[in-house]
Image: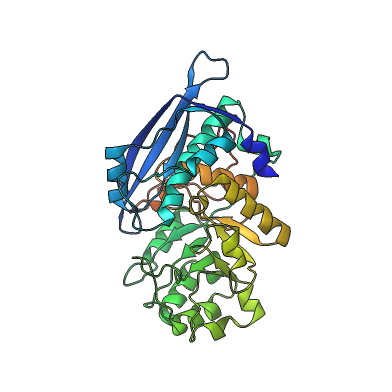
Amino acid sequence: MDYDRIADLSLTIESVASERHERETSSDFTRVTTEFALSGPTPNGDGTVTGRGEDVTYETEDHDRLAETGLPGLTGEYTFGSFSDQLATLDLFPGGAPDREVFRNYRRWGIESAALDLALRQAETNLATVLERSREPVRFVASTRLGESPTTDRLEVLREQVPDLEFKLDPTPEWDADLVAAIDETVGTDAVRILDLKGQYEGTEVDVPADPELYELVLEEFPNAIIEDPALTGETRPLFEDAGVRSRVSWDAPIHGLEDIEALPWEPDWLNVKPSRFGSLASLLETITYCNERGIRLYGGGQFELGVGRGQIQTLASVFYPDGPNDVAPRAYNEPAVGDGLPASPLTAPTDPTGFGSHANR
């Protein structure tokens, strides 16, 4: 199994540090993340090498408390597998429980991905080499909202920069036939690869209540788009009875591991893979293997990463699902104002000889 190849990697941690990142985003909120740096000896013992990972917990207060308390002790000699097992026993929120339990997975992933990065660097290798896989160019889409009073202005500016760009959009109850016509005129409905209905975020700020009229509109007017995270209610469920419609449905927010896939209302054709939701590399790789065996198509998803986390989800896409409509666009796409020189899809395959993704800005 893929995980077994990684679990046996040696890992020595001599010091732990963290750095806070903060930035405004295209979705009109201030994003805060924490980047972890785990350092240990180089393979020949004459220097130090550092592995990095990113905690994408969404509550700023959780990052503030972490800066005050620090993490539990992580230094020592391990295998990657034994470190992951140890991490599962620790309270990674010593300053107080997070508002949402899934944030525990987010923080664990941030630390575990730093440990993976360090273990690979100490072994002078990279993820693809260990797994005997290739690194391929990554197809990506630009994820963007159209505003509270939705317009196609941002789509138009992005298309001027990158003529063949594809999109992931978040429909809201304000969408109507006129807006759909404007989208079609601006970029073409076939360029919209994913429509995220955000029906699985109940109790959060981004939740969009089930709206049968909205659902019917997007199902009919975007016949080739993947439909992500619908809320299945008495009013909306009939829209998803047809097998052809079900084949277009993807799930994101409910998926934290294999058991969540098995609990879905039908076996999916598509899944959005956000590694931070899984918490551990073992759970992530187990799920990817399960999906590959069943022909479930995958694409990567992001969490407004500000540091190395973005490059790491791009690396995973490059190794496991490079041809999907990956929501892993370079960070420049998340800036509030569209800048010049945006990279076009596909992203070139990572070429870093060691580690779990580049420490450079991507």
Total labels: the figure holds: 0
User: Does residue 138 show up?
Assistant: no
Q: Horizontal and vertical percent for residue 297? A: 65, 60
Q: Horizontal and vertical percent for residue 235? A: 48, 86
Determine whether, in the image, residue 342 is placed left or right of residue 257. left
Residue shown at the point (37%, 37%) measured from the top left: 71
Say how the picture is coloured: rainbow
Q: Horizontal and vertical percent for residue 7? A: 62, 37
Which image quadrant: the N terminus?
Answer: top right
User: Does residue 202 show up?
Assistant: yes
In the picture, residue 26 is in which quadrant? bottom left
Q: Horizontal and vertical percent for residue 139? A: 58, 52
Q: Farthest front residue?
A: 89
* Vertical relation: 246 (above or below) 128: below
Choose between 67 and 149: the one closer to the eye. 67
* Vertical relation: 308 (above or below) 279: above
Residue shown at the point (50%, 64%) measured from the top left: 254
In the picture, residue 266 is in which quadrant? bottom right
Residue shown at the point (43%, 78%) measured from the top left: 210
* Vertical relation: 317 (above or below) 356: below
In the picture, residue 214 is in which quadrant? bottom left
* Vertical relation: 216 (above or below) 48: below
